[in-house]
Image (cartoon, helix red, strand yellow):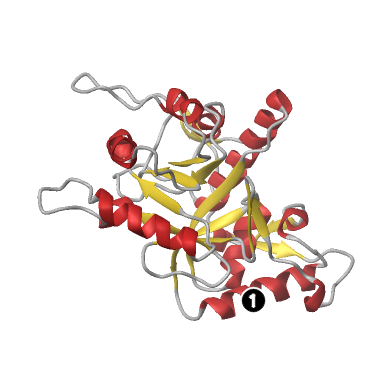
Amino acid sequence: MTAIEIGRGKSARRGYELDDVAIIPSRRTRDADDVSTSWAIDAFEFAVPLVTLGDSPIDGALSVLEAESFVDADGSFDIAAITEALSDADDAGAVSAIAVRPQRTQELLDGLGLVQPDLLFIRGRVVSAEHVSRNREALNLKKLVRSIEVPVIAGGCSSYKAALHLMRTGAAAVIVQSDLASQGVHVPLATAIADVRAARSRHLDETGVYCQIIAAVPVRNGGDVAKAIVCGADAVLVEPVEGDAADVIGDLRRTMATCGFESPKEFQSAELVVTK
């Protein structure tokens, strides 16, 4: 990729947000009724490629509990309430999933004991496979992933190298997101997803294991989801949906049909054009 010279001693790549790109239709179109929006991770399949956190579930999507919403007055996890919520999901025939920050992952797992969710999200603003700390023992993500039977989804990350290292821990999926909370640190989302897609290809070549990509995207309409998928995402972590989620899925289905693709996996092969 062509680098832009910032000055005599530094160059940079051009980065693109999702709003900076558009999807190019293919040579065929397809009936929208023939389009499938289903998505699967590990042994679990969902009707739509969306992931939600907290109290705003979307029909057909993966709904994830946030461990931080289950805390006692002293700040410790309310394990009884978490266990009940996970059991309720199991009883309802849903996939039980919970998200926790890296700093509190071991505390949560120790509290749950033999009670295990179907999926564990280890999520922070930026999550790396190699966190360095002089003041406390950092989470060894590789050791953790390989010591539990629960599939782990880890992130956020926004670069090729960071994503590749997360994938090499054995994570079932990585979360791509831009770090808007840190001043001066930001990778435009379309570029971040595409870079992580390249890391997934290398990891697949090295191991034969396909690691899912979940992109954290502010969703205004189905076009936002569609462009994230074409950039390389397998699913979208909704942050949040503006409007009716059913309209978002309908938009996604129509976009896929217009471009002639039958499934999200096929849709990843669509072409993009830079519009800005």
The answer, for residue 8, to whether it is visible in the render is no
Residue 27 is situated, as x and y percent measured from the top left of the image, at: 89, 65
Report the residue at 78% width, 72% height from top: 257
Give the residue furthest to the left.
74
Residue 72 is situated, as x and y percent measured from the top left of the image, at: 16, 53
Q: Is residue 228 left or right of residue 27?
A: left
Quarter of the image with the N terminus is top right
Kind of residue at disc 1? Asp
Quarter of the image with the C terminus is bottom right
Give the residue furthest to the top.
134
Q: Is residue 244 left or right of residue 139?
A: right
Q: Is residue 220 above or below residue 122?
A: below
Q: Is residue 131 above or below residue 51?
A: above
Q: Could you tell me how many numbered marks the image carries?
A: 1
What secondary structure is found at the residue carrying circle 1? Answer: helix
Report the residue at 47% width, 25% height from top: 142
- Residue underneath mark 1: 251
Q: Quadrant of residue 236?
A: bottom right
The answer, for residue 165, to whether it is visible in the render is yes
Q: Nearer the viewer, residue 270 or 188?
A: 270
Which class describes the residues within 10 Å of circle 1: few (<14), some (14-19), or many (20+)?
some
Q: Is residue 115 left or right of residue 103?
A: right
Residue 135 is situated, as x and y percent measured from the top left of the image, at: 18, 22
Q: Nearer the viewer, residue 72 or 142?
A: 72
Q: Nearer the viewer, residue 165 or 184?
A: 165
Residue 54 is situated, as x and y percent measured from the top left of the image, at: 37, 62
